[in-house]
Image: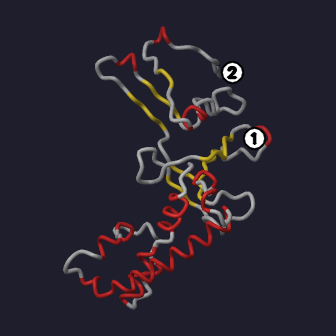
Amino acid sequence: VNSVAACIFYPFSDQFWQRQFMATALKDHLISLLPAAAPGLNRFDIATFSKPGSPWLSHRELMHSVICEEMCTVVGLVRQSLGDDPSGWRWGDLHQIAFAHRLSKLASWESMTAGPDETGGSPTTLGMAMHMGKGPGRAQAGEIPCRVYHGPAYRLVVDLGDTSQARFVIAGGNGGRAGSPLAINHYATWLAGEYFDLRLARDDAEAIETWSFGN
């Protein structure tokens, strides 16, 4: 969350410069209409276009120009969000996570929310965190520029030699009922990358609350 480089790298990756480069090089702007998640296209990188014998090598100057232009754009946008002094930039100020129940706008469910909180990670790190949003410089007041919407919903670590040492944590909580003390009881622990003991024996289970159905 304290990384300065991440403030540039991930918004730059979100720009998907490869699409602009290929559309210009091939003079086929149909490519510009393809989504960034189009199968295969989002796997191209500088090394892909720089392989010996690659037909893309004849467009190397264009690639350099597109990358520099996109990078300048990103730096300008980050400055709008985080200020002109890069030493004060933090990835956590752009990259945050928040959970909300679909009914949380109703008074009886308004407690079913968690966050927003800064978090690290990316789609390619062990602490996986995929984000979406308008990005730095484009988000409106109250909006998260890079809102994390997907990550490890359930973490489980098991010692196969001694399953009594199992550890787990859920992204939100262990209960989905409004007003339940378990609704978001795992969130802070999950966010910190920590775990709870997983008790597999019934006698070791601790009852927090009991639900029952009436007639």
The local crowd at label 2, few if under 14, some if 14 to 19, many if 20 or more residues have their Cα within 10 Å, is: few
Count of residue discs: 2
The local crowd at label 1, few if under 14, some if 14 to 19, many if 20 or more residues have their Cα within 10 Å, is: some
Q: In this view of the protein, which residue sits in the foreground, 49 or 101? A: 49
Placement of 195 over or under 80, stated as above or below: above
Residue 68 screen position, x and y as percent: 47, 78
The C terminus appears in which quarter of the rendering? top right
Q: Amino acid at mark 2?
A: Gly
Residue drawn at (54%, 76%), measured in percent from left and top?
A: 72
| Image colouring | secondary structure
Q: CA distance from mark 1 to mark 2?
A: 25 Å
The quadrant in which residue 142 appears is bottom right
Residue 57 screen position, x and y as percent: 28, 83
Residue drawn at (46%, 47%), measured in percent from left and top?
A: 128
Q: In this view of the protein, which residue sits in the foreground, 107 or 12? A: 12
Q: In this view of the protein, which residue sits in the foreground, 43 or 111? A: 43
Mark 1 element type: loop
Name the disc covering residue 89, or none.
Answer: none
Q: Pointer 1: what residue? A: 110
Mark 2 element type: loop
Q: Residue furthest bottom?
A: 27
Which one is closest to the eye, mark 1 or mark 2? Answer: 1
Placement of 190 over or under 116, stated as above or below: above
Q: Pointer 2: what residue? A: 214
Residue drawn at (63%, 27%), measured in percent from left and top?
A: 182
Left or right side of 83 for 167: left
Residue 174 screen position, x and y as percent: 57, 29
Placement of 186 over or under 214, stated as above or below: below
Left or right side of 61 for 211: right
Q: Amino acid at mark 1?
A: Glu
Residue 75 screen position, x and y as percent: 57, 70
